[in-house]
Amino acid sequence: MVEIKTPEQIAKMREAGLVVAAIHAATREVAVPGATTKDLDEAARKVLAEHGAKSNFLGYGGFPATICTSVNDVVVHGIPDTETVLSDGDLISIDCGAIIDGWHGDAAYTAFVGSGHSAELVELSRVTEESMWAGIAAVAKGNRLVDISKAIEGYIRRQPRPAGGKYGIVEDYGGHGIGSQMHMDPHLLNYVDRKRGRGPKLVPGFCIAIEPMVNLGTAKTHVLDDEWTVKTNDGSWSSHWEHSVALTENGPLVLTAVDGGKAKLAELGITTAPDPSARS
């Protein structure tokens, strides 16, 4: 069953989304050479406390931290610790969430640590982020879930291949419904699987976390013995981007973007819905 939200519930999700955006801003400042991934987790905890929000990651299925810190060939679900020290040239994806009055926000971004990153890594992150925005642009009345998947995969497939390689679209993990829980129906693939059909129709009140994960090589992954950390099978580096999005009567609203997605979606010819946080 897909949970359809009222405008009042979407407004609460927007509050949670802005806390997530604040965590992103704080962790970007900390993600520098010499910092540990535990330092980033502590920065996230501080933001949650400042906003009176709860973590939806800490304790989820036994997860031991407030954020996921996935470095280089780690795709998702990396666990922050004091042993993982960021180095110049690293790539890190940070995934985090927040709960306000029982309503959830969830988003991820990829950051470059220091400098000296190859053009292929820069392009990997760009392609992953832009494919997310292509998926967000497909969140429109009358479309179906598969239209989001099609937009994400289509964008990635249209990009020039990296030298001597390919972009691996991770198949084992994907986006999800979000609202009164962090993970809800429907599951969103980042590629089209015709066996799954078209999926539910997108209607006002539909909220979805869109999160492509793209590897600079194979799409195949494996989970480490900690039962959380997901790595690429071939050691290729990975990028992960995510936003939580609500469809309203007046169009989409990117709940976890500071501006509600207004600037980026305008580039794609889409007008975002009025932002309920602007009235508070």
Image (cartoon, rainbow, N blue to C red):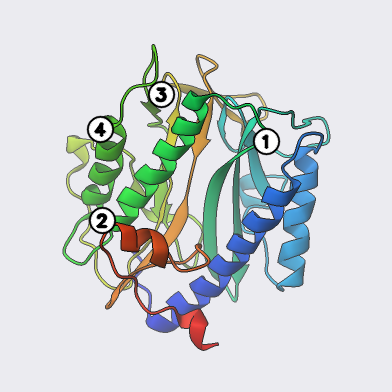
Instruction: Give whichever of discs 2 and 4 has the lower sequence position.
Output: 2
What secondary structure is marked by label 2? loop
Distance between mark 1 and mark 4 Cα atoms = 28 Å
Residue sticking out furthest to the bottom? 279
Q: CA distance from mark 1 to mark 2?
A: 31 Å
Separation of marks 4 and 3 at Cα, in angstroms? 17 Å
Asked whether 86 or 207 is in front, the reply is 86
Dividing the image into 4 quarters, which one contains the C terminus?
bottom right
Mark 4, residue position: 158
Mark earlier in primary sequence (1, 2): 1
Q: From the viewer's perspective, is 67 left or right of 201? A: right
Residue under numbered circle 2: 138
* Marks 1 and 3, the one that precedes in the sequence: 1
Q: Residue furthest top?
A: 164
Q: How far apart in space, not on screen, are marks 1 and 3 (Cα)?
A: 24 Å
Question: In front: mark 1 or mark 2?
Answer: 1
Q: Would you call the spot at circle 2 few (<14 residues within 10 Å), some (14-19), or many (20 or more)?
A: many
Q: Where 105 falls versus 37 (above or below)?
A: below
Coordinates of residue 7 in the picture (x, y in percent): 39, 81
**How many C-alpha atoms fall within 10 Å of the one at disc 3: few (<14), some, or many (≥20)?**
many
Q: Amino acid at mark 3?
A: Ala
Residue at 43%, 19% (x, y): give it.
217
Q: Quadrant of residue 202?
A: bottom left
Query: Which dot marks residue 219?
Result: 3
Q: Are marks 1 and 4 in contact (CB under 8 Å)?
A: no
Question: Which residue is tagged 1?
Answer: 113
Q: Is residue 264 left or right of residue 14?
A: left
Q: x, y (%) of residue 88?
A: 72, 28
Q: Earlier in the sequence, mark 2 or mark 3?
A: 2
Q: Secondary structure at mark 1?
A: loop
| Residue 42 appears in the rendering | yes
